[in-house]
Image (cartoon, helix red, strand yellow):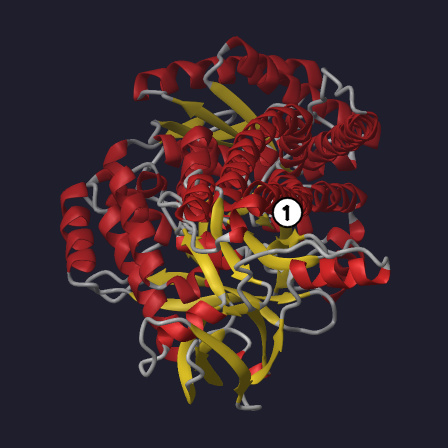
Amino acid sequence: MSLSKQLYIITAFIFFMIFTGNFIISVKNTKEYLELESITKAQDTATSLGMSIKTLLKDKEDSEVKSMISAIADSGFYKEIRLENAYFTVTQSQLIEANLDLDNSSWEISNLKIDPSFGKIEKVISDSEIAQELSALENEEAPIIENQEDSYTYIPSKRYKNGGNIIFNFTATNKIGKKINTSSIINMHKVITKVTRPIKFDYVPNWFINMIPINLQEKSSQISDGWQTTAIIYVSANSGDAYAKLYEQVKSALIYAIIAFIISMTILFTFVQYILKPLKRIEKLANDISIGKFGVIKKLPWTTEIKHVAIAMNDMSSKIESIINRLNNNLENSTKRLSHDELTGLSLKQNFETDMKSMFIHKSTGYIFIIKIFDLATFAKSHTNKEVNNFIKEFANNLTKISMENKKITAYRFFGSEFALIGESFSYEDTIKFTKLLQNNLEELTIKFNKKDIAHIGATPFNPIGTIPQMLQTANEAYQKATLIGTNEAYLGDSNDLSRDMQSWKELIFDIIDNSKFSVKYIGDAKLLDNSDKLVMQEAFTSTKDKEGIDIPIGTFVSIAEKYEKVIDFDKKVITKVINHILVKKVKHNISINLSLESINNTAFIAWIENIVLKHKKIANQLVFSITAYAVAKDMDKFKFFADEIHKCGAKIIIKRFESKFIPLNNIKDFNLDYIRLARNYTSNICNDNSKQSFVESIQELSTLLNIKVLAENVEDQEDLEIIKKFKLYGASR
């Protein structure tokens, strides 16, 4: 997970924690405040309403009491306002009216009783009785109060605390003295009046009400008549109003939180991008370093910690670049020592072969010359080593001088008295003119060194479908013919000497490719050099034969296939056979597959490779596509594109027969290679050649820095293998 995502997540989490805590506390406090406010208002209303209706309760059935309570309840703030009796009062007239046995004449009630299960009843002491008792105490005449009606207080049991139908038993006496024992049933009402309102508001959702309960206690106020409580008024606040206010508060808090979160995250995103921008530059520098591009971060970040990292990366990049430059210089020096003759300064035979390969790639024309100093051994017997060396150097200087005058000519010293020349793009007429010039120079050396026969010259045309050994053999045959002609003579072959005509080659190659008349062998077992002897790679080598059953040199086969645009079909069939071999034989090691330059330059072929590799993705990392160094040198940009595409589908890349002459060492880092397989001449007899040792050591150090594995090819001598192990190459084949 990226650092920016981690910062976004942790910031969002912290924001959520802070908001949630504040939100819960805010809702809790608001809820408590609304509850307290509602309860307080309900208590105040109960008190004020009780005082307002106090004077009206002499007649508890007075309609004005209910009207006043309804008017207060209509404000909507209250769920319920209820007026209840503090006690039950029964008058004599009520008992008489409720009795069915008594007529309308005047009756006096006495001996009033009720069933104990209903409670008990007590007579209320009237004001006149109290006044008479006070007067008696003070020896005064009591005031006369007429028509004072008796009343009784009913004290209910628990069962009838809220009233109900109560049976009152009593004795009724009229004016004529008639007495009747009878009873009356009176419905005692606890609630004098009650007004109720709904408690919910339509726009407050039920889930909100269920999630946040608001409990509003019922408040009351006693209404007294003198020293006695006559009624109690109860007021319950309507929680709907509190819910409405709380809901609005929650909505506002959530909207604010969302807006604040969006703004905060936007600011954070901008800030993080600004902070992490230097890290992206550091990442790019690290990736560049991994592929061999050693730049520096010029604009240092202002954040202290990141600035220190950037400075460290710059320092590391500069140091690695310095190391690689030093290694490159060492490699260039080693290459020069390995590829040039110390005495004459001419290129050695390995360079000749390299340049020949280049001519194959570029489908060049020209002539190959073999020049040998005649009877150098006899000359050496009669002269000192210094004189012999001077003679060879003078001879080589003539070749060098001619090469400098004619840019198409390159001179080489194979060994001892044997020299070679390549005349690129030479026609037969150009070769004749050049040979005459060379013979004139030889005549000058004859006079200078008093040696009659200096050298003989053999030349053969470059054969684009031949091989290097074949052309050298033909040139040597021409040289032998020149020795038979005379002193300092030359013999020139022509194109008619080619053994097969191109039409017959074309028919043969088409037949082999179209009908898959070739076999794939697996050679060059490359094993680890860590003493585990583990097989890490084999090379898929194709073998073809002509109609006579004679092996066709693979270089000749590929060259002709390229000429007639059949090499792509050939490479496809080879790849298919290798994949089947890995699947059928359950191969675990890597297989390198040689590809031609024409194939890797063909976008349709690259698309075909990607498709078939992706179909066999499980073995993709075992497929190592191999290109020769001299093929890469022809078009490095196209090779880099090919390598990038191959890596995308999970396969690997190797450059085989690697020589620094073909690929400048500074360019290795651009290819993102998996393997390099050194040319055989770099490791052959390495135990006795310090220059080769220095070269191999430097190339290994450079490849280690670039994460490239180095392989050695065909190491036959055990002493050479021990030297290679010392330099910690990845693997070697024998």
In the figure, 676 relative to 563: above or below? below
Tell me the element at label 1: helix
Q: Is residue 650 visible?
A: no
Amino acid type, mark 1: Gln
Label 1 neighbourhood size at 10 Å, few (<14), some (14-19), many (20+)? many
Which of the two residues, 3 or 374, is positioned nearer the viewer here? 3
Total labels drawn: 1
Please give left or right for residue 703 compared with residue 55 in the image.
right
Which of the two residues, 575 or 298, is positioned nearer the viewer here? 298
Query: Residue 556 in the image: x percent, y percent?
Result: 32, 48
Q: Quadrant of residue 326?
A: top right
Query: Residue 222 in the image: x percent, y percent?
Result: 65, 54
Q: Residue furthest top?
A: 405
Q: Residue at x 66, y 43 (%)?
A: 33
Q: Residue at x 25, y 67 (%)?
A: 549
Q: Is residue 240 visible?
A: yes
In the figure, 253 relative to 59: above or below? above
Classify the position of the C terminus by image quarter: bottom right
Q: Residue at x 39, y 30 (%)?
A: 491
Give the labeled residue for mark 1.
43
Q: Residue at x 51, y 73 (%)?
A: 162
